[in-house]
Image (tube, grey):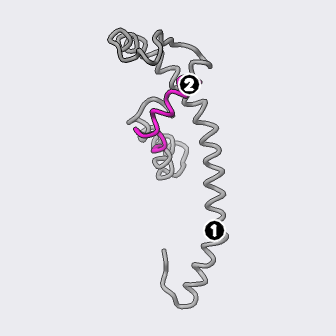
Amino acid sequence: MTPFMGLHTAMALFLAAVCKWNKFAAVVGVFVTNPLTAPFIYPIAYVVGNAAVGVSHIPHPPEKLLSFKAVADLAWNSPQILVDLSVGGVIIGLPLSIAAYWIALAMVEKYRRNVNPRLKKHRGKGGSSLI
């Protein structure tokens, strides 16, 4: 949940390769932060990161952020804003990714217990493979 949209895939593939994790799963996980979810994730990540490290300060209220002065201030403060967004993204992303791992693991184990034996049984009766 870092603010580096576009680099997420490269970062996930690199980490998956270094740690010898599943590269496909890493890329799929990256697509949680996309243009549809970013407007919801980034403000929360900014607030959390700003509360944790407080490097940046947005001097304008949200309703005035479209003024020229506000845009200029945002551009001037963008490195600090990126720090707060990055820290907030890590703080939010780590527990969510751990929870997602355990949920996905439970789903795979349930599939293996319930569906997979039925497929093997079906194939054993002369049926064609469903996979």
Residue type at the position of mark 2: Val
Q: Is residue 68 above or below residue 117?
A: above
**Residue situated in front as seen by the camera: 61 or 90:** 61
Percent of width and height locating residue 129: 49, 80
The numbered disc on residue 69 is none
Q: Residue at x 66, y 65 (%)?
A: 110
SS state under label 1: helix
CA separation in Å, label 1 and label 2: 37 Å
The numbered disc on residue 87 is 2
Q: Answer left or right for 28 relative to 88.
A: left
Residue type at the position of mark 1: Arg
Percent of width and height locating residue 24: 47, 52
Q: Residue at x 63, y 77 (%)?
A: 117
SS state under label 2: helix
Percent of width and height locating residue 10: 41, 39
Residue reaching furthest bottom? 126
Name the image quarter holding residue 53. Answer: top right
Q: Answer left or right for 71 relative to 52.
A: left
Residue reaching furthest front? 63
Residue 41 is inside the magenta segment: yes
Give the residue number, with chain letter if any, for mark 1: 112
Say whether disc 1 or disc 2 marks the residue closer to the N-terminus. Answer: 2
Q: Residue at x 64, y 38 (%)?
A: 95
Percent of width and height locating residue 2: 49, 31
Name the image quarter holding residue 92. Answer: top right
Q: Which residues are magenta?
A: 30-48
Q: Is residue 76 above or below residue 105?
A: above
Q: Residue at x 61, y 40 (%)?
A: 96
Residue reaching furthest left? 68
**Residue situated in front as seen by the camera: 25 or 38:** 38
- Could you tell me what secondary structure mostly forms the magenta stretch? helix
Name the image quarter holding residue 36. Answer: top left
